[in-house]
Image (tube, grey):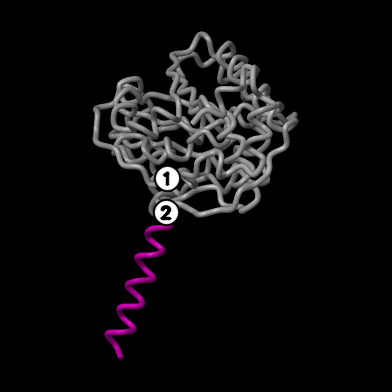
Amino acid sequence: MLKVGLDKAIGKARAVRSRTHPYLRNLALDLGVSAGSSTYTRFIVLGRSRVGSNFLVSLLNSHSRIKALGELLRDPANRTLDIPPSLQSIPLLVSTPTNPVRFLQRAVFRTYPKHIAAVGFKVFYYHAQGEQWKSVWPYLREQQAIKVIHLKRRNILKTHLSRQRAALSDTWVNTNGSSEGRGAIELSYDECVAAFTTTRAWEEQYDCFFADHPKLELFYEQLAEDWAGEMGRVQEFLGVEPERLTPTTYKQSTQPLAQAIANYGELKARFQSTPWATFFEE
């Protein structure tokens, strides 16, 4: 009986330690009690939803010297869902949401343990557009030492399909590698056109916006096909010692488009002889 009680007490103590240790470590760095470094590479993963950003971030975070964070600048009502324990600190708690620039300076691009070689986060084209948040974009452009990994997907039809399916199922990340069998869904022609044109416009706009930054263009198709080779390029770009990286998220569907889209034939015919016709080629 005593042993059972002792085991429970030890388990609770370990759980408390796991929750509080990152905060205490960061507090020690903030106060200068613990030595750290701020000479690491800073980067952003730029893109939009459903282009493989979770897959890329999971690969980055499997590197022992990289910290890749989530969508820190998205809708403030949801942003805290992407704040990992490793970032819980006084600067973070007092810097958001009214001052996103200070948040980046004091809570994200802050002093880290000396072994950390690169720190970055995801940001989508349409993040931080509200009045209190939009000042972060000029700040990011001015910080020309920030490296930009511009993640794109060649086939925007698959991006749009993935977005619609995720919204219907409310399942945004596949962490177990299983291929989900799903019924076909119908896509609107007009919504497809909007997705194609808007995404290409965003890509061009932000390529220009960050023209003076070190930039690496990365395509989801190549990353999914050969992540070892593509992540070799990414590690070289970030200036970190190469390691063998392993993903923790996977494709949510491997169905051919003709099986996944109920009105595939109709859409393929309507997009024939347009710049988007190649999206329907498997």
Q: Secondary structure at mark 2?
A: loop
Q: Which residue is mark 1?
A: 250
Q: Position of residue 112 (x, y in %)?
A: 37, 35
User: Which one is nearer the viewer's eye here, 14 or 159?
Assistant: 159
Disc 2 to disc 1: CB gap under 8 Å: yes
Q: Amino acid at mark 2?
A: Ser
Mark 2 Cα shell of 10 Å, populated few (<14), some (14-19), many (≥20): few
| Residue 164 image position (x, y, % from top left) | 64, 43
Q: Is residue 142 visible?
A: yes
- The magenta-colored residue range is 1-19
Q: Which residue is mark 2?
A: 178
State the CA–CA distance, disc 2 to disc 1. 8 Å
| The quarter of the displayed image where residue 145 is located | top left
**Vertical arrangement, residue 255 with respect to residue 178, above or below:** above
Asked whether 24 falls inside the magenta stretch, the response is no
What's the residue at 49%, 47% (across, down)?
A: 252
